Image: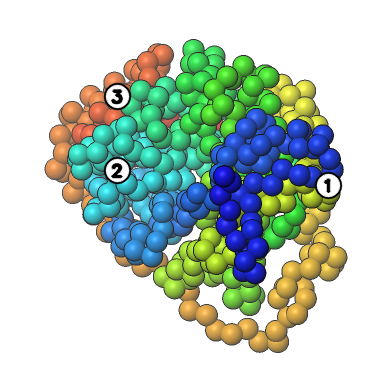
């Protein structure tokens, strides 16, 4: 007998509804939840069995400070950690390099070596905690540090679960924290795919991100079109390296934004799943259903947060989180209301998590799968977004694929046009932003932001100085030479990279060794 839950009025709520006002043709087109083309969700029961993973993106200052925040989040009920790294770490520089001056610990945690990674996860059970790391060009370095720390805890690679963002193509388009040229970056990504298939099989090897393009101004259609075009490039790279599609595709994951435009966001998520399922099956010959599933993490829209009347952001984030859940996300980060001003305070981070918990445990949206299925508006919007995204993906293909289009500046220019249009609409009042161009206060209430201690940079530099005096520098030098040799040839670079990091090579030293061989990416003037 079908399992039923009940509404507040005591009426039955079915886990899955299969009748549609559009008729039986729509039901067949959509398919069942957990079945191709996954329009209604990647799993048959979705949240009726258990809720999504509640991640909170956190990291600031030193590894020790961030570790304390992680313990607070786990105690508050967070099901997964999401690590923010500072800008020098993201760019492959150590905290004591001149270029890092003034940026250490500012937008995330500074991680220079395996010593810092050990401190970051001290006391956290890595066999039971799922960890997402927002890191791209140096993704391999941070993942290997994590694996080394886990091994010290007695946790094997096949017990580790989590995600590295590792999506460098969107960095060229929208964000800018790239290191190496596109060809070499793709080589490194395919090496990560192969290494994790052998060593860390449950790890999501890439989180292909539309979020940052959306934050730069991409529309929902542009967000999924350019993200899926990038994903196709990664798949082609892996296939060209000799990997089998069904060996690596089940570990691909995606990362999208959730805006306040609730209906379009839900339709966007449904359309993206359908496009990806057909792309993987029909274009790349994937036969494993897990290879055809678009599994994704969602973060609420940072770009829509306002410094004016910041408490109103609590309402925005609640609506955005609800849209992500109704769209079928696998994990969710809800932004803190004060992020438009500074790093989140402890109270703000806790309220962000409580927002997810209210959606999960006090609403009825988890009682049934894909509640909007069959809605005239929702099915029409899903179809329209799918058609428009496919047209834009074809435009990328006509330019030679994602990398060639990036080199021509196509995606960047398209996003910049959208961003300019949105900015004009806010300025002239045709797009309402509460507290900014409507319902403005004459005087804002005072707010005391969290501030990062400037002494952190000096502390990190002292730690690096001590590390370089304690370690076997000759052994580190030999290990880095082995890494350079692998980068010049065809061997998987993660193997010598892991040995160098085990010997306490720094992240900057590893990145510089690869720069010696691969060079650094210089954008074209057209960018």
Dot 1 or dot 3: first in sequence order is 1
What residue is pinned by disc 2?
Answer: 127
Q: Are the residues flagged by discs 3 and 2 in contact, CB closer than 8 Å? A: no
Which SS class for mark 2? loop
Q: Are the residues flagged by discs 1 and 3 in contact, CB closer than 8 Å? A: no
Q: Which mark is residue 79?
A: none
**Residue 302 seen anywhere in this rendered image of the structure:** no
Specify whether 220 is left or right of 215: right
**Residue 499 seen anywhere in this rendered image of the structure:** yes
Q: CA distance from mark 1 to mark 3?
A: 59 Å
Residue at 42% over, 27% down: 192
Seen as rendered, the residue at the extreme bottom is 442
Residue at 41% over, 51% down: 80
Which SS class for mark 1? loop
Q: Which mark is residue 21?
A: 1
What residue is pinned by disc 3?
Answer: 496
Q: CA distance from mark 1 to mark 2?
A: 46 Å
Q: How is the image coloured?
A: rainbow
Q: Quadrant of residue 505?
A: top left
């Amino acid at each position: 007998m079908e399992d039923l839950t009940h509404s507040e009025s005591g009426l039955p709520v079915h886990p899955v509804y299969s009748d549609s006002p559009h008729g039986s043709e729509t039901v067949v087109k959509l398919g069942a939840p957990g079945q191709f083309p996954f329009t209604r969700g990647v799993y048959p029961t979705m949240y009726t069995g258990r809720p999504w993973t509640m991640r909170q993106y956190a990291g600031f200052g030193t590894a020790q400070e961030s570790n304390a925040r992680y313990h607070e989040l786990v105690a508050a009920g967070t099901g997964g950690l999401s690590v923010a790294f500072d800008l020098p770490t993201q760019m492959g520089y150590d905290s004591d390099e001149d270029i890092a001056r003034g940026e250490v610990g500012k937008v995330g945690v500074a991680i220079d070596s395996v010593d810092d990674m050990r401190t970051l996860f001290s006391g956290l059970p890595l066999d039971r905690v799922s960890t997402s790391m927002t890191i791209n060009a140096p993704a391999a370095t941070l993942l290997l540090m994590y694996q080394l720390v886990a091994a010290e805890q007695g946790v094997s690679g096949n017990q580790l679960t989590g995600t590295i963002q590792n999506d460098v193509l969107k960095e060229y388009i929208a964000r800018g924290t790239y290191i190496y040229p596109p060809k070499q970056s793709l080589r490194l990504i395919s090496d990560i795919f192969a290494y994790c298939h052998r060593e860390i099989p449950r790890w999501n090897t890439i989180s292909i991100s539309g979020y940052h393009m959306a934050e730069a101004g991409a529309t929902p259609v542009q967000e999924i079109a350019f993200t899926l075009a990038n994903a196709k490039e990664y798949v082609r790279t892996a296939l060209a390296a000799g990997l089998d599609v069904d060996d690596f595709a089940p570990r691909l994951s995606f990362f999208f934004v959730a805006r306040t435009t609730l209906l379009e966001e839900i339709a966007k998520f449904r359309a993206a799943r359908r496009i990806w399922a057909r792309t993987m099956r029909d274009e790349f010959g994937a036969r494993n259903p897990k290879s055809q599933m678009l599994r994704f993490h969602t973060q609420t829209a940072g770009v829509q947060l306002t410094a004016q009347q910041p408490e109103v952001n609590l309402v925005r984030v609640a609506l955005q989180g609800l849209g992500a859940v109704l769209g079928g996300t696998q994990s969710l980060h809800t932004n803190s209301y004060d992020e438009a001003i500074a790093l989140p305070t402890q109270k703000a981070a806790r309220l962000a998590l409580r927002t997810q918990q209210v959606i999960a445990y006090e609403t009825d949206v988890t009682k049934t799968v894909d509640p909007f299925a069959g809605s005239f508006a929702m099915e029409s919007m899903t179809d329209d977004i799918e058609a428009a995204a496919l047209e834009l993906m074809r435009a990328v293909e006509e330019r030679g694929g994602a990398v060639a289009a990036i080199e021509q500046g196509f995606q960047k220019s398209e996003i910049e046009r959208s961003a300019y249009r949105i900015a004009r609409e806010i300025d002239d009042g045709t797009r309402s932003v509460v507290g900014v161009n409507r319902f403005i206060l004459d005087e804002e209430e005072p707010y005391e932001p969290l501030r990062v201690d400037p002494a952190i940079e000096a502390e990190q530099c002292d730690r690096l100085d001590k590390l370089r005096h304690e370690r076997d520098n000759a052994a580190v030098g030999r290990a880095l030479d082995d890494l350079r040799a692998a980068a010049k040839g065809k061997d998987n670079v993660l193997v010598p990279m892991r040995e160098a990091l085990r010997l306490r090579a720094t992240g900057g030293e590893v990145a510089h060794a690869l720069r010696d061989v691969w060079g650094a990416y210089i954008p074209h003037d057209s960018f």
